[in-house]
Amino acid sequence: MHPLRGTSIEPRNVNRSWDARCHKARVLKITVHDGRRTCGSLLADLDVHPRVAMRIPAPRPSRRPMEIYTDICSEATRAGLKRLGESL
């Protein structure tokens, strides 16, 4: 789903955008899935709360109990992203 419009995103467009960002950053091209896993692993290594870490690489709704019964403010999400950025 498109985060701003609530409509579907064409997968090929996501891949083209991802590939362009990898090229611009001069990093090895990996799949979007691998990028999400890497992000999650880095957040875990930085001891970012698991609930915050779940929102950063995959902010889509899920049915996991932890997501249903807890909520993380956007300040905590920003703090987790800041820690990730500083580590890189």
Image (spheres, helix red, strand yellow):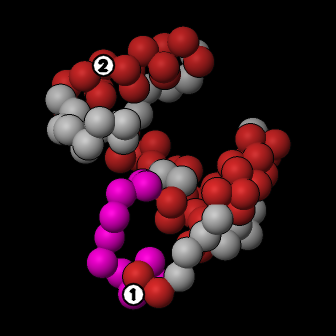
- Under circle 1, the secondary element is helix
Q: Residues within 10 Å of mark 1 (few under 14, many from 20)?
A: few
At mark 2, the secondary structure is helix
Q: In the rendered view, does 56 fall on the left or right side of 7?
A: right
Find disc 1 in the rendering and name its residue.
Answer: 65
Residue 3: where, in percent of width, then height?
36, 41
Confirm whether residue 50 shows in the render.
yes
The reply to whether the magenta stretch includes residue 62 is yes
Task: Quadrant for residue 68, please give it.
Answer: bottom left
Query: Splitting the image into 4 quarters, where does residue 65 fall?
Result: bottom left
The foreground one among 29 and 74 is: 74
Identify the residue at horizontal 53%, vertical 82% (top origin): 70
Q: Is residue 55 left or right of residue 5?
A: right
Question: What range is drawn magenta here?
Answer: 58-67
Question: Which quadrant holds the C terminus?
Answer: top right
Question: Dot 2 surroundings within 10 Å: few (below 14), some, or many (20 or more)?
Answer: few
Of mark 1 and mark 2, the one earlier in the sequence is 2
Q: Residue furthest front?
A: 5
Q: Amino acid at mark 2?
A: Arg
Three-letter amino acid code of the residue under disc 1? Pro
State the mark number for residue 16.
2
Magenta span: helix, strand or loop, mainly?
Answer: loop
